Every structure is written in structure tokens, then in C-alpha cells.
Amino acid sequence: MSVDHCFSIKGQGTVMTGTILSGTISLGDSVEIPALKVVKKVKSMQMFHTPVTSAMQGDRLGICVTQFDPKLLERGLVCAPESLHTVHAALISVEKIPYFRGPLQTKAKFHITVGHETVMGRTLFFSPAPDSFDLEPVLDSFDLSREYLFQEQYLCKDSMPTATEGDDEADPKAGHAPGGHCPRQQWALVEFEKPVTCPRLCLVIGSRLDADIHTNTCRLAFHGVLLQGLEDKNYIESFLPALRVYKLKHKHGLVERVMDDYSVIGRSLFKKETNIQLFVGLKVQLSTGEQGIIDSAFGQSGKFKIHIPGGLSPESKKILTPTLKKRSRAGRGETTKPEEGTERPEPIQPVTLNLSFKRYVFDTQKRMVQTP
């Protein structure tokens, strides 16, 4: 029941008036004020000044309880004991309000209205994986078994930049999807600055109430449905690691030279100070078509050795042959000092390297994962 007024009657007790949102209530039932963790017994009930013994969903009702200070509750929720819970964060389904100007940014703070409360909350937006953009929206539950793609901002057509020449696909970080295609459903993790009490599947409204009311702008930013509340105060450790939201990472480098038919030396993929050992075992794709595996670091300048299980193709060796010949003339004794002074000639046609992997946002070990 949503309570909109609370007052005392001398000799009777404290009366809470409001509307029953769901369920039924009878004389003598116990009710809980979840925000205060207080349980009281119903002494009497009235509807429009008429005493009643029971009431149901949709009824306007006044219930009288004893030994409760009305100053403790102006507005709020009253419920059957333990049927509502206080949450510190929530997973919500999100839809942007078209009249709101500007993007919905991850890590931005909004005024979050949920139940009878409005509190500040920080948002993190995420979408389905790109191959699931067209799945039918599910508005009554959240599937923790699925993987989700992290977004720097809510994806929508009005946030998409104009395509420029050479752009094959859009960057999900920038808040737009490949080919201008938006997912049918998006979500957000909302972390509240103070706990809120609300029912599951309730309406959530995100707004910017600090915006200037004299400007001709909409202050309501988004609306959604609360799909799952996080009751544990330590939800960051207890719950978030199970939320599989990932970022797609792409790194690009070059093949510097060939060591033999099954191994090459790469560069420009990592910084000099990068611990390459963390990347050992990850797959890289060569622009000539071969797939390699990062084998080890090579020297101290960020270079690395790549093992190519299937070996270099004759075409690839042909592209890299000029490099091999020119290097051999430089002197065999100088191969261990590629950084000092002399520039090594590059292949006529540069061979690029591409390293792609997932990193899960809430993985405490910050592991890098590649799809098989």
C-alpha cells in the first residue's frame, strides 16, 4: 500500500491513508513499514469514513495502528511483513525519453525516482551482445546467464555521429552501434547514494532535476522497470562478479620480421612498460590470413615473439622476404640489438597484427578472454 498521509487521532492511534497497490488486507493483520523495519497490527480500518474488515487492490483505505509516531512516516510504503526489501543498487531495463537533450552517459549521476523516493544514483549502461540486438525485449526478469556489452552511453540514433570515410564499424564506446543499428532493449546498473525500499518491477524514472527550470528543456532523461534489486550492502563483492558485462578490446601492431617459417617478431602492439607475460597465449590475426599465438616477450622494448601453428604461407613469406634478405646483410652478430641505432628495413607491404579480446567489467582478476 502506498501511504500519502499519516496522522494521529487522540485515543485511537495513528492512521495511515493511501491506496492498496496489490494484494488484500484484513482486520488484525500485521503490516510492516519497511523503511523503518517496524511491524504493527491493524486495529481498525475505514474506507470513506466507513468501517471495513477487509480491503483489496485499488481501494483507498485508512488503517489504524497503535504506538507509532506519525512524524516518522509522511509518505512511503506499507506492506505485508518481509514482502518488500531495501536495495542498495538495482538492475533496470532502460528507455531514453526522446525529448531529453544530450546523451545518457555511463558513470553519470541522475535523480532516480523509484517508489515514493527520489535519490541520487550513478548509472552504468549496457546492451545485448551485437548478435542479440534484435532479440525480443524481456520486461519482467533479468537473465544473469547471458553476456552483455558495456556501453559508454545509452545507444540511440540521435547520439550517432556522421560516418567518416574509412570507418568500417562504429565504436561501442562512443555510444553508437555498428551500422547505426540499435538494440531493442538496453539495461543499466543503478547504484543508489542511499538505500531505497521498493517493489520489484516498479517504475523507475531518471531525471536531471538540477537543470535550469527556466530553459526550454526536458529534465526527465529515461524511464524503466526495476528487474532485480541488490539487497546486500556488499553487492560489489557478492553480486557484481556474476554480472557478465564485458568491454571489447582491440590492439593493432605490425610484423617486424620473420624468424622462421613458424615464428615472427611483432611490435607496436604494446608499450615498452607493458607486462607482455599477461598476454602470452592470446591469439593474434595477421593481415596475410594466418593466426598466431603470442609466445613470449622479445627484448625490453615491447616487442614479442609470435608462434604460427600452421606456418607462414608462401605468399606471406614472399611479402616478408625483402626484410629477411636485408636483415641478413646487417650482420649476424647484431640481431640481439635491433633498438640501438640502425633502422631495420620494413617489408614492402606492411603486415599488420590484430589482437582482440574481452575484458569483464566486474571481474576482480581483470582477465582477458577470447572466444574460441
Image (cartoon, rainbow, N blue to C red):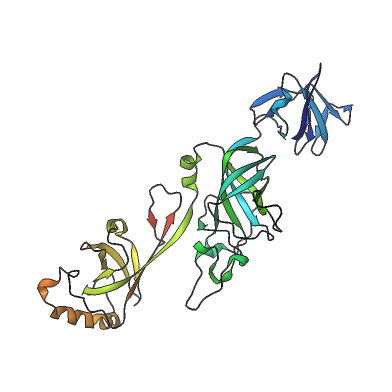
The answer to which of 51 and 5 lies nearer the viewer is 5
Q: Quadrant of the N terminus?
A: top right
Q: Residue at the location (83% across, 35% down)?
A: 60
How far from the left and from the top, in percent, is residue 361? Answer: 45, 52
Residue 30 visible in the current orientation: no
Q: Residue furthest top?
A: 11
How far from the left and from the top, in percent, is residue 212? Answer: 67, 52
Q: Quadrant of residue 79?
A: top right
Decide: is 2 above or below 154: above
Q: Is residue 235 left or right of residue 61?
A: left
Q: Is residue 65 left or right of residue 125?
A: right
Decide: is 110 above or below 296: above
How far from the left and from the top, in percent, is residue 230? Answer: 56, 41
How far from the left and from the top, in percent, is residue 245? Answer: 49, 53
Decide: is 160 above or below 144: below
Q: Is residue 322 left or right of residue 60?
A: left
Residue 226 visible in the current orientation: yes
